[in-house]
Amino acid sequence: MSQEEHDIVQLTHDYLRQHGELFGEDLYVDPAVLSQSRRDSDMLEDYHESIRDCRKCPLAETRHHLVFGAGNPEANLMLIGEAPGEDEDRLGKPFVGKAGQLLDKILAAIDFQREDIYIGNILKCRPPGNRDPLPQEIALCLPHIRRQIEIIEPRIILTLGRIAAQTLLETTSSLGRLRGHVHTYRDIHLMATYHPAALLRNPQWKRSVWEDVQTLRHLYDERVRDKPKWQPPKRK
């Protein structure tokens, strides 16, 4: 056991001992924390209901499901992609196809699971043939992801793909110029990287994504610090 792991175990032991002295054997959780979590979850669900039948643009005529988003309403890390694909449109959930499976592996590599984060998209409906979103579609749908960000209040955002990054940062800079840096979106740290679907077509970009998510995890440990400090796996 490393010194850091030993310290974590000791701190946990001391906390539980003090907790037992104060509250007995029953685990105490601050009701205010539970209440806030319920409020955020309820607010997200209410907002989902309010836009479930959105008909603001023609994509409503070709979609199977409006893909709202999914994950932890209290997440400190929020991932934002471009738009649902075929599998997401069919199932009504974000990142469930091959790109989603790759995303899960990327997250696991930095010790994150789906339940730790919240995932959404700039567009809630699939563009036909997975084409790029049109400017007017983005303009009409953008208030939805902005509202989700307001409710969730993440500490860090990771955008997946060029369009998500350019939209939130209000820039035309290439993804190559945007990735590798920590930006700011409404006082929230924002990083940009390639979309998992792009990695399936261009596996040579995987190294860049690995660099990006390592930086992301170190930023998370520095700014959020609600998880044990992460160390990159040692190369064999």
Image (spheres, rainbow, N blue to C red):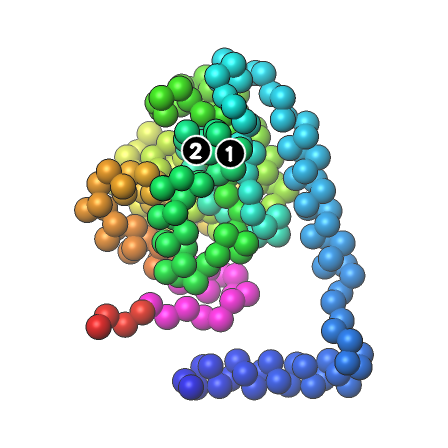
Residue 224, given in percent of the width and then of the height, sits at 52, 61
Quadrant of the image for the N terminus? Answer: bottom left
Near mark 1 (Cα within 10 A), the count class, few <14, some 14-19 or many ≥20, is: some
* Dot 1 amino acid type: Leu
Q: Main secondary structure of the magenta part?
A: loop
Tag shown at residue 145: none
Q: Are marks 2 and 1 in contact (CB under 8 Å)?
A: yes
* Residue at 73% over, 50% down: 38
Identify the residue position indicated by label 2 in the image: 87
Residue 70, given in percent of the width and then of the height, sits at 55, 43
* Dot 2 amino acid type: Asp
Quadrant in the rendering for residue 18: bottom right
Q: Is residue 169 above or below residue 234?
A: above
Task: Reply yes or no: does residue 4 show up in magenta.
Answer: no
Residue 130, given in percent of the width and then of the height, sits at 36, 25
Which residues, given as a range, are shown in magenta? 218-232
Residue 155, given in percent of the width and then of the height, sits at 53, 52
Q: Is residue 50 above or below residue 42?
A: above
* Residue at 58% over, 82% down: 11
Tag shown at residue 91: 1
Q: Is residue 224 above or below residue 183?
A: below
Q: CA distance from mark 2 to mark 1?
A: 6 Å
**Residue 185 visible here:** no
* Residue at 41% over, 59% down: 108
**Residue 72 visible here:** yes
Near mark 2 (Cα within 10 A), the count class, few <14, some 14-19 or many ≥20, is: some
Q: Nearer the viewer, residue 133 or 172?
A: 133
Please tell me whether mark 1 sits on a helix, a strand or a loop.
helix
* Residue at 80% over, 79% down: 23
